Image (cartoon, rainbow, N blue to C red):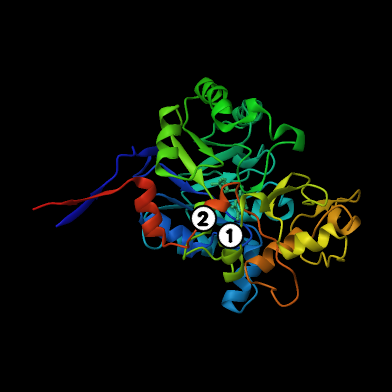
Amino acid sequence: MLESTSPLPYLIIKGKRISLPIIQGGMGVGVSLSPLARAVAQEGGIGIISSAALDRLLSKRNNRKMSVYEAAYEEISLAKASGGYAGINIMCALVKDYEDSVKGALDAGADFIISGAGLPLGLPAIQPPKDTALIPIVSSARALELICKKWERLGYRPDAVVLEGPLAGGHLGFKMEQIEIESNKLENLLPSVKDMAMKYGDFPVVVAGGIYTHDDIVRFLTMGADGVQMGTRFLATEESSASPEYKQAVLNTKKEDIVIAHNPGSPCGLPFRVIKQAPMYESSLKRLRSPKCDKGYVLLKDEKGQFTRCPAKESNENYFCICNGLLSSAGYNHDEEEPLFTVGSNAFRVDKIVSVKKLMDELAGRVILQTA
Ligand SMILES: Cc1cc2nc3c(=O)[nH]c(=O)nc-3n(C[C@H](O)[C@H](O)[C@H](O)COP(=O)(O)O)c2cc1C
């Protein structure tokens, strides 16, 4: 008989014993959906779907109009269908749909809600989370303290925290000028965030951003992290729902192709890591495009309290249309819109697209044992 063992320790969050301390990070739009999350959960890690534009993606898949609530509910149910632990990433920047995504995920019994791209100060107050673990993403001990203080007043404390450093994919929780600072390296941020987690109840700290190999995982666990969250490695899997063109762009990318977009940049106002050859980014640099801005996921309220304001709508010069660009890179409106490709800083190291099983075996350092 063949059995496999991993030298990595398990991770416990809110009483859930996760065999491998690896969270597959939420990747929106439409990169981490139930096929990816389910596969990771089956391999003993934590699979995370992304809530971004999920209503549109699932309405298309099911050929019927689905609400934000229904989409979160359905995708969590599918992600958990084959066993293991699965949850959802809900970005604070998606203000309009935030609460409905949370409610759909909670009602479907999500194991985790992971929330960043802003401070999820009101998350525990939306609905009693029951068995669902609530996990903020932060980039500093200060941000974690703000969240802990606010959540304390709501009678809750984080079940774990994800500390995301400046090498991650997607939006970054740093100002442009802070990204290269030595003290903001993930390993240098970890001790103060660990101390803060200890102060507010000794909950697990999961690190993210630039973690690529089994040895990287061991290194961070040795430094005191309880687990890791990884994005780019999972983007380059067979089960990720990125378009074939997106996966090919990751395979082609060189170190110098990975840049941080900020002007033109994301309408969310945070630096955003991209492959510079991504068509939407290239034409934004040339100030060539007029964004459609018809999807509205990052809308903010106007003075009358209506969700009408998006910087990309107001200033085509300085911002790209992130909703349409990322939907296109998930194959949604591919014929009408140019794609935008976000990756972590290590994407240039990816040289093949592999199955989740193969990736998890590698990351876990699994040794196959022959037993009687
Ligand atoms: C394609 C892609 C999309 C991402 N989308 C999101 C997202 O929607 N919300 C979020 O909180 N983080 C997002 N991230 C960040 C990841 O969840 C993860 O924390 C980060 O990528 C870790 O760094 P790594 O890519 O170096 O492993 C994204 C990352 C990538 C590569």
* Secondary structure category for the residue under label 2: loop
Tell me which residue sits at (66%, 69%) in the image.
56
At label 1, the amino acid type is Val
At label 2, the amino acid type is Val
Q: Quadrant of the N terminus?
A: bottom left
Q: Give residue 190's quadrant in the image.
A: top right
Q: Is mark 1 within 8 Å of ligand 1?
A: no
Q: Give residue 67's quadrant in the image.
A: bottom right
In the rendering, which numbered label is found on residue 250? 1
Residue 14 at x, y percent in the picture = 43, 38
Residue 283 vs residue 293, the one in the foreground: 283
Q: Earlier in the sequence, mark 1 or mark 2?
A: 1
Tell me which residue sits at (24%, 50%) in the image.
4
Q: Is residue 141 above or below residue 283?
A: above
Q: Give residue 326's quadrant in the image.
A: bottom right
* Secondary structure category for the residue under label 1: helix
Label pair 1/2, CB-CB below 8 angstroms: yes
Residue 127 at x, y percent in the picture = 59, 46
- Residue 358 shows in the view: yes
Q: Is residue 280 left or right of residue 135?
A: right
In the rendering, which numbered label is found on residue 350? 2
Q: Is residue 304 left or right of residue 191?
A: right
Real-space CA distance between mark 1 and mark 2, rounded to the nearest whole angstrom: 7 Å
Q: Which residue is situated farthest in the left direction here?
A: 372
